[in-house]
Amino acid sequence: MVSQSTIQKYEMVIGLEVHVELKTKTKIFCSCPTDFGAQPNTQCCPICTGMPGTLPVLNRQVVNFAVKAGLATNCKIASDTKQHRKNYFYPDLPKAYQISQYDLPLCEHGYLDIETGNGTKRIGITRIHIEEDAGKLVHLEGEGTLIDCNRGGVALIEIVSEPDIRSAEEAKAYLQKLRAVILYTGVSDCKMNEGSFRCDVNLSVRKKGEKKLGTRAEMKNINSFQFAVKAIEYEFARQVEALESGEKLVQETRRFDQNTGKTYSMRSKENADDYRYFPDPDLPIIEITDDERNALGAEIPTLPDARKAKYIEEYGLTAYAAEQLTIQREIADYFEKAAELTSHPTLAANMILSDVSRLLQPDETEIPIKPEHFAAVAQMSGDGRINSGTCRSLVQMLWEKDIDPEIIVREKGLEQINDEAVLSGFVKEVIAQQPKSVADYKAGKAAAFQSLIGQVMKKTSGRGNPVKIKELMTELLED
């Protein structure tokens, strides 16, 4: 394994190809349904299985959804475009070609802005094109491979980024932002566990300062932010190690194994010439007028970046916090409802990003607390009626049983103790009972001070004002 100092001499160059299944009721070229989880081979017909003599008919809703996705990602929309046959022999494509787009994509030259540790970064989007999905292969160890054609012909858009990404965290931020934008438009449910939002990672490495791109490897069909990060980190280290040992890298397709956290070679990477693209003779030119483009643009709701700007300006949130709030539309909707009901909206935002995020399961967006109850907790905390620990506990209680938090605070006696005379009595009591901790603090051990604060908080049943307790403790210990 190469050393960290060696790895730091290199940089990764990443481009992402994201496949998004569109939320159409029927497939792209036939009337078969697109419901997920149906029995194998029950949602297919002679058209989507490529039987001889059949003719495809384009589902216009696919074009409309793709245009919306393009507009939402700042792309230029083609006024006319066409579809191509992408030829390759693989069992999940019974007709031995996929209908896609080659040199005239529907959408081009877009971008998304992401938040990084160094501020805002713009990631270019090369193109968005429409295509049909392939079927699914089911491998049975020792028995063979089965084919389920249900997914074949499901409408896809492929969103291809520029090679502007330089770290696993940037890749994750881009994927999260892209998924958020697509969800806002409503053109896909983006369910990663069902494969309706998945990506191929193209990664190469080069010495820092070099301009020439290295030999890239493509990692296929990654359907988790976490797996994307792990695949990128492993593949970067693998390529650096190979170069350092004098090995010549080859352009190839690799598979990421989520159990081992490693990538494995599948096949040498095909080039465009290998696919023998040519215009599909059965499908006409797709035309999009200015009026159609404008009408579709008018249907797009307020997108994450606009909400992000609003949160920064109106509530004083950091760019990163505002970005995180807008990643999921339902969370942003919830925050805005709660923010209208409290004079401490920034605190409400922080509670969502900390306490709520901790309680939500991955990809879950439904918060089981009424916005007015959540706002009431933020109000009590911001007004100093409860401390931060009680605030956190209240959110947990309401998560399990949503009732008026005022009732809980009153019945359980959870209001914060702010009376300095009362708090001073507790502080003096702890100082008298903990001579060793007092001696340790005076000897310069910072941890002893926190221990003393913890003892006071325990005596107040967690209700003491921690700021005032620290002030009183410091004052009394230095007398």
Image (spheres, grey):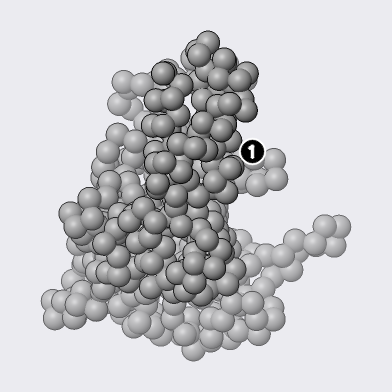
Answer yes or no: is residue 192 visible.
no
Q: Is residue 100 above or below residue 173?
A: below
The C terminus - image quarter: top left
Residue 284 position, x and y percent, is 31, 79
Residue type highlighted by circle 1 = Lys
The N terminus - image quarter: top right
In the image, farthest residue toward the left: 290
In the figure, residue 184 lies in which quadrant?
bottom left
Q: Is residue 278 above or below residue 444?
A: below
| Label 1 Cα crowd, 10 Å radius (few <14 / some 14-19 / many 20+) | some
Residue 78 position, x and y percent, is 21, 67
Q: Residue at 53%, 85% (x, y): give it.
A: 33
User: What element does badge 1 sit on?
Assistant: strand
Q: 44 or 370: which is nearer to us?
A: 370
Q: Residue at 66%, 45% (x, y): give it.
A: 257
Q: 463 or 145: which is nearer to us?
A: 463
The number of numbered discs placed on residues in the rendered structure image is 1
Q: Which residue is mark 1?
A: 262
Q: Residue at 33%, 27% (x, y): give it.
A: 212
Answer yes or no: is residue 142 visible.
yes
In the figure, residue 89 lies in which quadrant?
bottom right
Q: 328 or 272: which is nearer to us?
A: 328
Q: Is residue 247 above or below residue 457?
A: above
Residue 178 position, x and y percent, is 37, 57
